[in-house]
Image: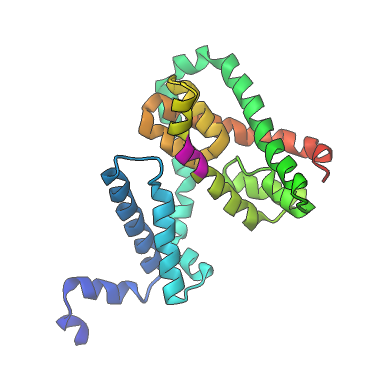
Amino acid sequence: MIEHLLPHGAEAWVYLAHTPLLWLTLTLVAYVVADRISIAAGRHPAVNLVVIAAAMIILALTLTGTSYETYFEGAQFIHFLLGPATVALAIPLYRHWERVRASALPILASLTVGALVGIFSAALIARALKGSDLIVASLAPKSVTSPIAMGLSEKLGGAPFLTTALVIVTGVAGAMMLSPLMRLLRIKDSAAIGMAAGVASHGIGTARAFHIDSVAGAFGGIGMGLNGAFTSLVLPILRPLLGL
């Protein structure tokens, strides 16, 4: 009876609060709000919608005392959509296929250099700071997308959940630095910008590349996909050089 006296919004809240849909709804609302804030800021690199949305969700979980497991039970549908979203990157790739094919050698060169620098720079800095083997193993695959990075981290003896956090930090940092760094280096070619974003900062960087233009987004998708495959192949081989 009480529910019938509540406004429609409150009725919806009463319903959602007793189902896993609450956290799916919260995630979508957080994203929409963060996206509006990003648009209002003119898509400024420092106003990253991933950071804003994540902060909103973390705050909500902290205030309500909700565990990650409970949150994920409701929000896992979005996690499932990561696969189809990654596959959908093939659409801009198809649209710009002629340019991609003409850039095969530069793509391979930038992939090789970018992937190796991403692996060794993190590992060497960690070693210089007296980081443990676990830290080095968790850092080494930080530049590839989360599912691949977690698998590689576990195989190397790292902590997969630590690697996930490092992957997110790497992606956000890359997305925020992309436009200012490219301007500083006077790089204007969309393909080069997108490739750099995809190789260095996986999906989050690729999303930022799409805000530049479709060519940058297409090459970001290529960089992200190829770096995942390349790193999966070479990282186990490079393990002795990392001291693992």
Is residue 87 among what the camera can see? no
Q: How is the image coloured?
A: rainbow
Residue 58 or residue 220, whichever sits in front:
58
Residue 152 in picture, x, y percent from top left: 70, 46
Which quadrant does the N terminus fall into?
bottom left
Q: Residue at x 21, y 82 (%)?
A: 3
Q: How many marks?
A: 0
User: Looking at the picture, does residue 14 appear above or below residue 100?
Assistant: below
Residue closest to the far bottom: 1
User: Looking at the picture, does residue 162 appear above or below residue 96?
Assistant: below
User: Looking at the picture, does residue 80 appear above or below residue 184?
Assistant: below
Is residue 4 among what the camera can see? yes
Q: Residue at x 34, y 62 (%)?
A: 25
Per the rendered image, the range of residues in magenta is 173-177
Q: Residue at x 47, y 76 (%)?
A: 65
Q: Main secondary structure of the magenta part?
A: helix
Q: Is residue 105 magenta?
A: no
In-image side of 107 versus 172 (left or right): right
Residue 211 in picture, x, y percent from top left: 36, 34
Residue 106 in picture, x, y percent from top left: 58, 17
Residue closest to the far top: 102
In-image side of 12 versus 86 (left or right): left
Residue 10 in picture, x, y percent from top left: 22, 75
User: Looking at the picture, does residue 3 appear above or below residue 210?
Assistant: below
